Amino acid sequence: MCTGRCSRFIAVALYPLVLISVICNIVLFFPAGETKYAKDGHITEEVKYMGGLVGGGAMVLLPALYIHLTGKQGCCGNRCGMFLSILFAAVGVVGALYSLAVAALGLQNGPLCRVAVVWLTPFKDKDSNYLTDSTWWNVCTEPKDIVQFNIGLFSTLVATSCIQVILCASQMINGLFGCLCGTCIEKGPL
């Protein structure tokens, strides 16, 4: 497979991952499907870092668009284009790593929720791991099912970000081959 076709495959694979990251981050702003928590500032701190919107979203979308254009004709147009795709893919790796770090931190610290009458992050800095012990989850009284909500969406962001890192790193290697070895040339009949 030539480097341009590989670029196009990688870019097309990145588009749905970008969409998933953005949707997950937006949904995290509305626990229990309500806007009142965001209005009152009662959302998990890691959601405000917008890892899915900025990192897994915009910082991966721009490289995906450029990488797609690089492989537009099935083969890349020139070595300079492939070199630039390495740089754009590096930006994608950084964005995906940012999204991964924020999502992992969100999983580790747990959600912001109401415990009795105060809003706090009850699982942060605890020895026991709330992810594997669901008996702790009923500590959060509001928003409804916030622990499951955060675990599901942050886990999706972790998985999505890992795949984005792999694809963007693959494009960096693909771009290096395209830059060093040149573009693939279709040879006609002899």
Image (cartoon, helix red, strand yellow):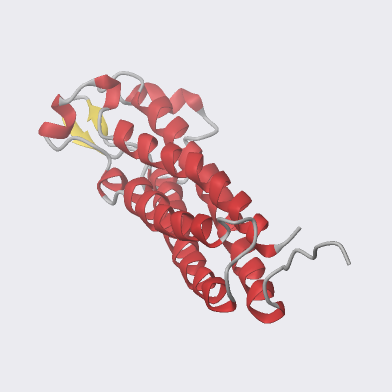
| Residue that lies at the very extreme toward the bottom in this rendered image | 180
Q: Is residue 62 left or right of residue 14?
A: left
Q: How far across and how far down the image is residue 60, in percent? A: 44, 55
Whether residue 162 can be seen here: no
Q: Quadrant of the N terminus?
A: bottom right
Check the image and report above or below for 188 versus 79.
above
Q: Is residue 31 left or right of residue 89?
A: left
Q: In this view of the protein, which residue sits in the foreground, 138 or 72?
A: 72
Check the image and report above or below for 129 versus 69.
above
- Residue located 60% across and 63% down the image: 171
Q: How far across and how far down the image is residue 4, in percent? A: 64, 61
Whether residue 24 can be seen here: yes
- Residue located 28% across and 26% down the image: 31
- How many marks on residues? 0
Q: Quadrant of the C terminus?
A: bottom right
| Residue that lies at the very extreme toward the right in this rendered image | 190
- Residue located 55% across and 55% down the image: 72
| Residue that lies at the very extreme toward the left in this rendered image | 40
Q: How far across and how far down the image is residue 176, in percent? A: 64, 75
- Residue located 29% across and 40% down the image: 121
Residue 41 in which image quadrant: top left
Check the image and report above or below for 31 versus 67.
above
Q: Is residue 179 left or right of residue 154?
A: right
Q: How far across and how far down the image is residue 2, in percent? A: 72, 62
Check the image and report above or below for 48 versus 79.
above
